[in-house]
Amino acid sequence: MNGRIFITGDKHRTFVPLFWLAEKETLHPSDVMIIAGDAGYVWDKDYIYDMESLQQVFPGTIAFVDGNHENHAMLNEFPVEKWNGGNVHRVGERIFHLMRGEIYDIYEKKFFVFGGARSVDKDRRTEGVSWWKEEEPTSEEIEHGQNVLHQFADQIAYVITHEPPLFARSSIRRQKSLDEDYQFPLILNQWYQSIENQPNFRKWFFGHMHVDQEITEKLLGVYHKFIEI
């Protein structure tokens, strides 16, 4: 029996939207919720209490790509295992960190995911306490993602990223500055162009910009909403 798949945006360690969802929907163990980065629940040594609370509020599986505001050092300490065909960090009994450039088969749909972004507020944060340099994808991770994307381009139904493709920013009122040396959004432009006309491709969801907004028919920003696919 297939369950439902919900896509949502940045949560920054809050539980309030999950309570709203639980009040609105009858949730089931077969349901899957994917957070498009900045989940924030793995932040400090008390993360285990957040995992317990998440699993009490949501009876199904929670999977998140990493955003820029995550404790990347802690995430990378978890052992790597397989989940639905791709590499993950298991951070709770039913909670997984989806790793950059991986493909997952969820209810007969292929998802390509890629987390990470550059923080515009890192000058106001403390490295190793509230900011980690691993937030930004490395060239090796980008190369891995590109190779996987090209290999499975004709099979991928959904893409989940934290950072949006560069062209999306011109349509979004909430602007975030871009450093000249930060090329990742431009690379996502190229990835979007390479997949938008593929036969099985349906939607690309991104977080980061804190908007629920349709940029194109196939590119959507997610934040507060829980979009069922």
Image (spheres, rainbow, N blue to C red):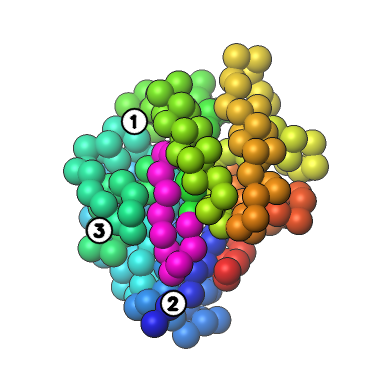
Q: Does the magenta stretch include residue 40?
A: no
Badge 3 marks a residue whose secondary structure is strand
Tell me if 174 is positioned left or right of 72 in this view.
right
- Please tell me whether the stretch drawn in magenta is mainly helix, strand or loop: strand
Residue 195 vertical position relative to residue 49 in the rendered view, above or below: above
Residue lying at 42% horizontally and 49% vertically, measured from the top left = 103
Q: Distance between the residues labelled 1 and 2?
A: 38 Å
* Residue denoted by label 1: 129
Q: Which of marks 3 and 1 is nearer the N terminus?
A: 3
Q: Which of marks 3 and 2 is in front?
A: 2
* Residue denoted by label 2: 3
Kind of residue indicated by mark 2: Gly
How packed mark 2 is, by other alpha carbons closer than 10 Å (few <14, some 14-19, many 20 or more), is some
Q: Which of marks 1 and 2 is nearer the N terminus?
A: 2
Residue 47, image x, y percentages: 27, 51
Badge 1 marks a residue whose secondary structure is loop
148 or 5: which is nearer to us?
A: 148
* Residue denoted by label 3: 92
How packed mark 1 is, by other alpha carbons closer than 10 Å (few <14, some 14-19, many 20 or more), is few
Badge 2 marks a residue whose secondary structure is loop
Residue lying at 65% horizontally and 55% vertically, measured from the top left = 199
In the image, the segment drawn in magenta is: 100-110
Q: Distance between the residues labelled 3 and 1?
A: 22 Å
